[in-house]
Amino acid sequence: MAALEIAGLVHSYGQHRVLDGLDLAIEGGEFVALIGPNGSGKTTLLRCLAGILAPQSGQVVIAGAVMSSDPMGAKQKLGFAVDPTLLPPLLSGRQCLELFAGARNLAAIPAATLALAQELAFDTWLDREVQSYSLGTRQKLGILLGLIGEPPLIVLDEPMNGLDPLSAFALKQHLVRLTRDQGCAVLLATHALEVAERFISRAVLLLGGKLVQDWNTAALDAIRHDADNSLEQVMVEALQRHGAERIDRA
Ligand SMILES: Nc1ncnc2c1ncn2[C@@H]1O[C@H](COP(=O)(O)OP(=O)(O)OP(=O)(O)O)[C@@H](O)[C@H]1O
């Protein structure tokens, strides 16, 4: 069963159609970078996957659960980092993690989550109130909440932004382990192509409301082994081919 199947997804803000019949399938174990220029619709797509935005048409199926008809079932199979600005200020990180563990029918915070908290240097913040956290520390908690229980599909929007280099490195290593050892699928929206290139197994390019290019593992390996090439370069070339260097125009 695919970790994610999207068919004919359409989402508009008023008259502005951002997703225009988008299709995508991701298998367990794939680590997919979602790339695209500013305003191409990456966040909109991820929010449709998370059930935060309701698409006008099309279907999202997460590990067999259809988001429109079984939103609770679909969300149980999805990990989505919580927006740092939406965390409850008066709870501690541990209390937030316990709440999310309960929502995933787990008796306690999993050992893997506590281990990741330590790798992210978040363990010293576990018993302090969220309102005392810096933005980066809030972001770490949002990520820990999204990953709790290692769901079949993990969706992250620029998760490394705002993390210090050691924490960003630890998170990348953790995501690689989740895909390789646990069979989770990761869909990661990012502009950091030089970073993504090193650890992803696939990259898809969003443009004009659709995925216009899909680089599989073999294509990425070929890019990695070519000293004169990079994911950044092939993306620039793909954008030029599609005649869109920048699309976020007013
Ligand atoms: N709530 C909203 N109301 C109206 N338009 C919106 C809203 N949110 C996003 N948009 C528009 O939808 C388009 C896609 O935005 P989105 O944030 O999904 O792009 P993105 O690819 O994530 O961009 P970035 O790389 O800059 O984060 C943009 O033109 C944006 O201005």
Image (spheres, rainbow, N blue to C red):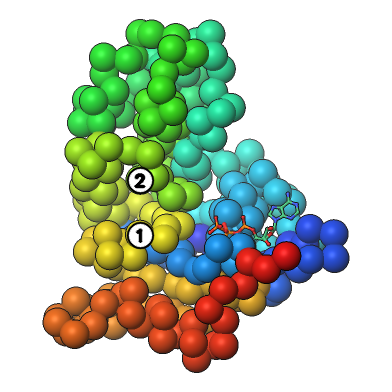
Amino acid at the residue labelled 1: Ala
Residue under the point 50% across and 54% down: 63
Residue under the point 34% across and 65% down: 193
- Is residue 69 shown left or right of residue 143? right
State yes or no: Cβ of the residue under disc 2 lies below 8 Å from any atom of ligand 1.
no
Please name whichever residue, 56 or 13, is drawn nearer the observer in this view of the structure.
Answer: 13
Residue under the point 20% across and 38% down: 166
Q: CA distance from mark 1 to mark 2?
A: 9 Å
Quarter of the image that includes the C terminus = bottom right
Q: Residue 150 at what x, y percent from top left?
A: 36, 40
Up/down of 136 relative to 242, above or below: above
- Is residue 106 shown left or right of residue 125? right
For numbered disc 1, what is the local secondary structure? loop
Q: Which residue is mark 2?
A: 160
Q: Which residue is mark 1?
A: 192
- Is residue 75 shown left or right of residue 237? right
Question: In the rendered structure, which disc, 1 or 2, sits on the residue that comes first in sequence?
Answer: 2
Up/down of 31 relative to 111, above or below: below
Please name whichever residue, 99 or 193, is drawn nearer the observer in this view of the structure.
Answer: 193
Quarter assignment of residue 171: top left
CB under 8 Å between callouts 1 and 2?
yes
Q: Residue 156 at what x, y percent from top left?
A: 45, 48
